[in-house]
Amino acid sequence: MTDIRSGERVAGQPAFVLHTYPWRETSLIVEALTRDYGRLALVAKGAKRPMSQYRGMLNCFCPLMISFYGKNEIKTLTRCEWHGALPLEDKVLLSAFYINELIVRLVARGDPVPKVFDCYYKTLKKLASGANHYIELRYFEVEFLQLLGYGMNAHSYEAPYYRFSRGELIQADSFEEAFRSSTIRALLNGTLEPGEQEQEARRMTREFIEYYLEQKPMNTRRIINELQKLKS
């Protein structure tokens, strides 16, 4: 693997766009998750011009092969090609954007995280396949946290109830403000049931995520909550 700190060129790197924002008059800054180099900031020069090679290419949730170079924190994107397709239905798009925001907020730039890339790609494929997106979000959250070293402490969870305390689950005396051990085991074993059990798992993963985000709110979660209020 090329050391990108040397400024050498990297070619044909699998990647996904997480977020883009304008840079100067005609360019974009691209936040990307790459397989071998982790989360990177890339400048796509001239990307907003009508005849740019990047026109229509830098979309979220599309598997890409990219090339880039640069010694500084923001690299220069030199090439971008589609590498397949993952058509996501409208109903799962906010869930997918939520995953992108989690990665941007919790993965440091330049930290190689190939297993996070694999987990992300696997989850997008599940969402594209029509799987229950609420269940798949819970599986992503717990695996993602574990890969970053923020996961649930490893034991069999044999007591009836556990509660969240400072980044881990500890035994609780009752179900009040706690979680059933059966739900914890189902989440970890990939056997989570939709409905009440998934909702309980959602409360649990939310406590973990809010703790590691230092209680700073997520934009996509606020949008989801507002949409749910409009539907009710």
Image (cartoon, grey):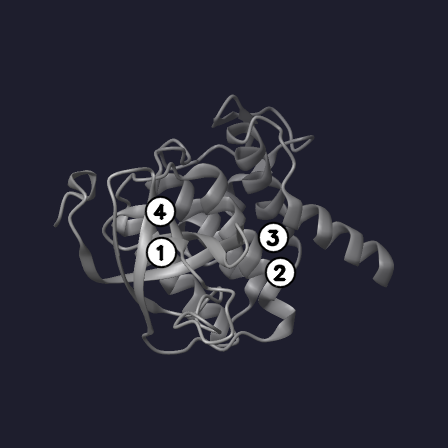
- Depth order, front residue of 187/56: 56
Q: CA distance from mark 4 to mark 2?
A: 22 Å
Q: Is there a contact, CB below 8 Å, between mark 4 and mark 3?
A: no
Q: Nearer the viewer, mark 4 or mark 3?
A: 4
Residue 197's disc number: 3
At label 3, the amino acid type is: Gln
Contact between labelled residues 4 and 1, with CB atoms less than 8 Å apart: no
* Earlier-in-chain disc, 4 versus 3: 4
The residue furthest top is 166
**Foreground mark, 3 or 2?**
2
Q: What amino acid is at disc 4?
A: Leu
Dot 3 or dot 2, earlier in sequence: 2
Q: Earlier in the sequence, mark 2 or mark 1?
A: 2
For disc 1, the marked residue is 119
Q: Is residue 82 above or below residue 15?
A: below
Q: Is residue 81 above or below residue 137?
A: below
How far apart are the two marked residues, 2 and 1, measured between alpha carbons? Answer: 18 Å
Judged from the image, the secondary structure of the residue bearing numbered disc 3 is helix
What separation in Å lies between label 4 and label 3 (alpha carbons)? 36 Å
Q: Earlier in the sequence, mark 1 or mark 4?
A: 4
Q: Nearer the viewer, mark 2 or mark 1?
A: 2
Element at badge 1? helix
Give the residue pinned by disc 4: 40
Mark sitting on residue 94:
2
